[in-house]
Image (cartoon, rainbow, N blue to C red):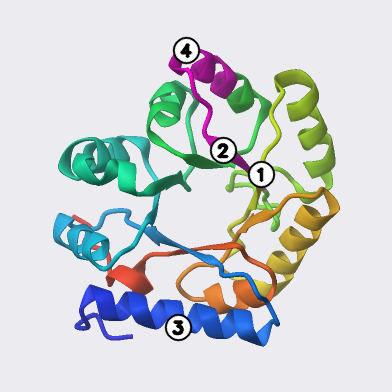
Amino acid sequence: MSDDLPIAEKRASILERMAGAAKRAGRADRPVLVAVSKVQPDVRIKDMLAAGQKTFGENRVQEAQKRWGETFAAHRDEIELRLIGPLQTNKTEDAVRLFDVIETLDREKLAKALVKAAEKVGRMPRLLVQVNTGQEDQKAGIAPQDVEAFLALLKAEYDIIPEGLMCIPPVDEAASPHFWLLKKLADEHGLKTVSMGMSGDFETAIELGATHVRVGSALFGARDYD
């Protein structure tokens, strides 16, 4: 898709492709498009909001605070804001205050910090558990074989019942087996939300059961890094 197209046209094209993937899979539900606004300039965010986008994903707490707590604060109550990047425990309180959903719960220490922050702030965002489907040493997430025990721990020790799972497949492997595994794990544990698929593979993810796809560059255009 050309970067020269207006944001609204890119979004319409992505939504059409998502609908096609859902139809091919025989799905009656409508997967949610999460617009990944990481490192995007304000003008693109403004255009995306004007196009009617209501769900945004942010990778970093500090960047999200500036964008949605300052620049676009007037729009904050209109959107659902999801943290899709790793969360450090020293940023937990800020994250709990800002985000509607945190997709990257991946360790007991973070669960404990989230509960503490929620008690202080008076609210708990909805939570997803990140699964390291490729079992990559450098990547966060619970190993697939440990998901059952981790979910049991969250419920027993912290009264946390996540609403779903998320994953980021290895970049050098086919994504399909990882998407299939994540959906299988979600189904086994009665979890309805499955966040998987990005710009290059969101159609495959939807065909394999994604309820949420996280799309950045294909939606906004190439990121403007300094």
Q: Which amino acid lies under the numbered mark 1 shown in the image of this protein?
A: Glu
Q: Is residue 158 above or below residue 8?
A: above
Q: Which amino acid lies under the numbered mark 2 shown in the image of this protein?
A: Arg
Which residue was labeled with disc 1? 163
Location of residue 84 in the rendering, given as x and y in whole percent from the top left corner: 48, 48
Mark 3 neighbour class, 10 Å CA radius: few under 14, some 14 to 19, many 20 or more: few
Q: Which amino acid lies under the numbered mark 3 shown in the image of this protein?
A: Glu
Q: Nearer the viewer, residue 41 or 16?
A: 16
Q: Is residue 46 left or right of residue 118?
A: left
- Residue 126 image label: 2
Q: Earlier in the sequence, mark 2 or mark 4?
A: 4
Magenta residue span:
113-130
Q: Is residue 32 covered in magenta?
A: no
Gap between marks 3 and 1, in whole Å? 27 Å
Gap between marks 2 and 4, in whole Å? 16 Å
Gap between marks 3 and 4, in whole Å? 42 Å
* Screen quadrant of the C terminus: bottom left
Location of residue 41 in the rendering, given as x and y in whole percent from the top left corner: 18, 57
